[in-house]
Image (spheres, rainbow, N blue to C red):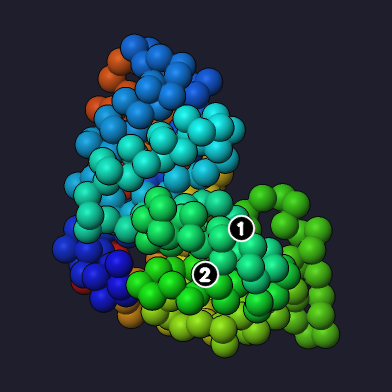
Amino acid sequence: MNRSSLIRQIRQKKSFLCVGLDSDILKMPEGISHSAQGLIDFNKAIIESTAEFAVAYKLNTAFYESLGAAGWEVMEKTLEFIPKDIFTIADAKRGDIGNTSAMYARAFFENLHFDSITVNPYMGKDSVSPFLDFEGKWSILLALTSNPGSQDFQTLPIGREQVYMQVLETSAKWGSPENMMYVVGATRAEQLARIREIIPNHFLLVPGVGAQGGSLEQVVKYGANNDIGLLINSSRSIIYASSGKDFAEAAGREAAAMQAQMKEFVD
């Protein structure tokens, strides 16, 4: 999916919601088996109940890869359920030397047909470029994450800046706003203004709104641009809104509530 198509979806749905399918086989709700088929049934029901409110789905691949070969089949099946006009993200956090990254890119872009993949830029340009070589696909680089440990390295000072700022400034030259996004945690909303000074036009994938306590209003205030430029990811607060047989309906209500808040910010 290209940038203009993604923006069009945001305008049409008046939403910039990304639903995170961090589907844990150990947390299946009542009536869903704790098995690979159960995950398929769960994801299908969640997608059907939330697709009208979402512009993206993010699959955290760890929850699937932990199942071995069956997990890859679950991802394949899940992607078939997602409407073709909705953006798909493989939250795989890959990144390695060039030929290895090229194989990771083939796995997620050619075999699973995701629109995008999250990438750790720590090893530098040659670990990211193979992902950017795929036309029509996106690399979503980790910049400033929402976990407490992000302060161990990401915010360390480098002269007048911090490490994550240097990551943004350097990596922005590797691609463009047409094929690169950045992960920026909502719990770091106060730093979004500075981030937007460095990368005014790139999309930001923002986790941490909802269950992790991030504020939608603050993220939009400091992080939105003329195209919105945000994908707000919500995982647990949507997919685990209920542990009963009404889990899909509860997920739909939660997604609808988030979309209702978001439409206030979409022209």
In the picture of the structure, the residue carrying the numbered disc 2 is 131
Depth order, front residue of 54/250:
54
Direction from residue 182 to residue 10 in the image, left or right: left
Q: Nearer the viewer, residue 181 or 259?
A: 181
Quadrant for the C terminus, please: bottom left
| Separation (CA) of disc 2 from disc 1 | 10 Å
Left or right, 167 with respect to 258, comes to right
- The reply to whether discs 2 and 1 touch (Cβ–Cβ < 8 Å) is yes
Label 2 residue SS: helix
Identify the amino acid type marked 1.
Arg
- Residue lying at 22% horizontally and 58% vertically, measured from the top left: 85
Comes first in the chain, label 2 or label 1: 1
Image coordinates of residue 220 in percent, x first then y, are 41, 66
Q: Percent from the top left, x then y, of residue 150?
A: 72, 57
Query: Residue 133, percent across and down?
Result: 48, 76
Q: Which residue lies furthest to the left in this view?
A: 12
* Image point (70%, 68%), residue name: 97
130 to 235, vertically: above or below: below
Q: Looking at this view, is 27 or 134 the one in front?
A: 134
* In the image, farthest residue toward the top: 31
The quadrant the N terminus occupies is: bottom left
The reply, left or right, for residue 240 in relation to residue 174 is: left
The circle on residue 94 is: 1
Residue 119 appears in the rendering: no
Q: Is residue 96 above or below residue 124?
A: above
Residue 201 shows in this picture: yes
Place of residue 47 in the rendered image (x, y in percent of width and height, measured from the top left):
28, 39
Q: What residue type is labelled 2?
A: Phe
Q: Pick whichever, 177 or 93, lies toward us.
A: 93
Looking at the rendering, which quadrant does residue 95 occupy?
bottom right
